Amino acid sequence: MSKNFPENFVWGSATASFQIEGAAKQYGRGASIWDAFCATPGKVEGGHTGDIACDHYHRFEEDVKMMKELGLQAYRFSIAWPRIQPDGKGEINQEGIDFYNRLIDCLLEHGIEPWVTLYHWDLPLPLQIEHDGWLNKDIVDRFEKYSGICFENFGDRVKNWITLNEPWCAAVLGHGIGVHAPGRISSSEPYIAAHNMLLSHARAYRVYKKDFAHQEGTIGITNNCDFRYPLTDKAEDIAAAERSMEFFLAWFADPIWKGDYPAVMKEYVGERLPEFSEEEKREVFGSSDFFGLNHYTSMLASEPSEDDNLVSDIAGNGGMIDDQKVFLSDDPTWEKSHMQWNIVPEGCGDLLKWIAARYDNPIIYITENGCACDEPSAEIADNDLMRKNYYESYLRESRKAIETGVDLRGYFAWSLMDNFEWSFGYNRRFGMCRVDYETLERKPKMSARWLSQTIAQNGENI
Ligand code: GBH
């Protein structure tokens, strides 16, 4: 068996508009729910905002050059909806279109393939204030229009589209426990938001296939999933781990790959789980050309005992934990990242296999994978051995999964550079390139140089 990754394996890195662009109030960009969330006292560490971020809006040429030097083949970025339609529904802001045209052209001139996410959480604020954002079904029509504008303007050059990034986060973190914009806290809204996101995704997919088929691109959704191992080999713990996976990933993936929500969710959530009409089921089923996966960490799952405290506000585990009836814990031997997320490389391989088994071996792309390291100085950042080891071990397990038949076609490291880490502000660094937030200077860290060599030999060094 060759030690290489498959021929044509896509090697890239990823970012998101709000996390890097800055120029938040310039060039006709409207406000997003994240601008409002940042302006709400106590929501973001240090009161940080996206106003300047990494100033990528002004420095994208330098950033593309850096990608080229690292040998990246693909770059996944997101489009800020409020830059394209400042109020989310009406007029197009030409300056926004021009910006992404410049970025896309620059990438192509450097031989880097653009992978474009339409929505990475920066919803135009008026849609939230006037229409309740993802809670209102009329978002489906609005997302359709916005997507169409993007396909029409960029689709001659962009051949890889991702509709939504991590609807689980927008649903659970944004509408369940309120740690992400729009900051809602509810036990029913996450299911409604998720439902409308699935319908919006599917609509964008159908429009692309119907009206833009001549562009001959691929389009899919990216879901995130933390893997779950059973705490013990007792049947009820094995069932708890499986149930947790269904609440995490199958919630979003089953409707697309199987045609409806998992039975266990219908049973446990009851009438708070919206239902798809037969027509909607048909629209959602089969609406993704590939399985986009963002993966970072794993946890242990068990059947809750009487004294287990089911805390519904553990960030990341989600308010839905009350519905799942699963108790989550850590294996004390697992190393943790600066996010306190467990570093569990074999979880990555096992998750890939879980997806392959449940969804009939779809084409998978890892559209995000990475590690936060505490890097107070440039010297420490330059020695990011922990991140290099993280990439290497997760990639090794990915390759092993490929060897068992998993159809993994690409890997995008999160993130190209240090950036605005949502509610943690600029205090958590995920970048393979350092950003000095004073001077805004960027510099590849050791992990980036390692990834660069890895790409050059298609992973033979792993
Ligand atoms: C991604 O989400 C985002 O797409 C990206 O914008 C962001 O910058 C990046 O990750 C880093 O945060 O609390 O131990 O139970 C990641 C999705 C969901 C992964 C919650 C970790 C919680 C682990 N995350 N999960 S834990």
Image (cartoon, grey):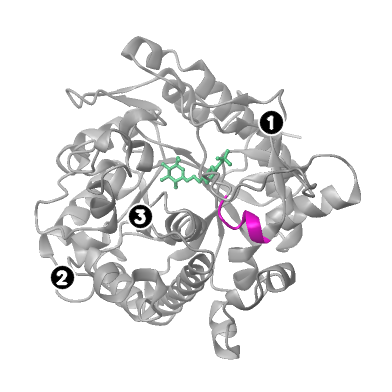
Vertical placement of 427 versus 159: above or below?
A: above
Q: Residue 39: horizontal and vertical position, in percent?
A: 22, 48
Which residue is at 57% across, 88% downward? 277
Name the one closer to the observer, 8 or 357. Answer: 357
The local crowd at label 2, few if under 14, some if 14 to 19, many if 20 or more residues have their Cα within 10 Å, is some
Residue extending furthest top? 379
* Amino acid tagged 2: Ile
Circles 3 and 1: CB atoms closer than 8 Å: no
Task: Quickly name the residue at label 3.
Answer: 181
Q: Residue 336: horizontal and vertical position, in percent?
A: 58, 26
The local crowd at label 1, few if under 14, some if 14 to 19, many if 20 or more residues have their Cα within 10 Å, is some
Residue 68 appears anywhere in the view: no
Task: Quickly name the residue at label 1.
Answer: 3
Please state if 17 lies on the left or on the right of 395 as rendered.
left
Please state if 189 lies on the left or on the right of 147 as rendered.
right
* Amino acid tagged 1: Lys
Name the one closer to the observer, 127 or 395. Answer: 127
Where the C terminus falls, by quadrant? top right
